[in-house]
Amino acid sequence: SFKKFPTAQVNNYSFKLYIAKTPKDKEVGLSKYKNLAKDMGMLFPFEKPDYYSFWMKQMKFPIDIIYISDGKIVTIYKNVEPPKSENESLLIYKPKEPSSMVLEINAGLCDTYKLKVGDKVNLYNI
């Protein structure tokens, strides 16, 4: 049987999702990939809203980091670059208000699709 792919829809744009379910998945995130297809993203769901921090440890490509609470975007970090070397100190990214999930997509797509704080995020097949 065909299993429907987990998907996030923001405005008229859809992203097929990898889901970071376990603490290990959340720690590794997208760092295990060399790149990401344009229509793909990774969703990090959390038990309750909080100020979850993210960094770019061992990442190989830039991303946009989107914090979501109650089905709406609350904070966006655009074009977050991976570290240039292992010795570079890592910036820590946190939301402006408590969030219950984070969506990571390719860098530049927030600008390309004009995604902004307050936009509604619909999730399917999660």
Image (tube, helix red, strand yellow):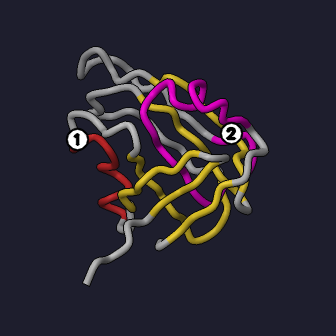
Q: How many numbered circles are shown?
A: 2
Query: Which amino acid does the dot numbered 1 rest on?
Result: Tyr
Lower sequence index among marks 1 and 2:
1
Give the x, y percent position of residue 15: 46, 50
SS at mark 2 in the image: strand
* Image: magenta residue range: 95-116
Q: Is residue 3 magenta?
A: no
**Residue extending furthest bottom?**
1
Q: Is residue 104 magenta?
A: yes
Identify the residue at horizontal 46%, vertical 27% (top origin): 107
Seen from the viewer's position, the closer of residues 17 and 54 is: 17
SS at mark 1 in the image: loop
Q: Quadrant of residue 49?
A: bottom right
Residue pointed to by mark 2: 75
Tag on residue 85?
none
Residue pointed to by mark 1: 33
Give the x, y percent position of residue 52: 57, 50
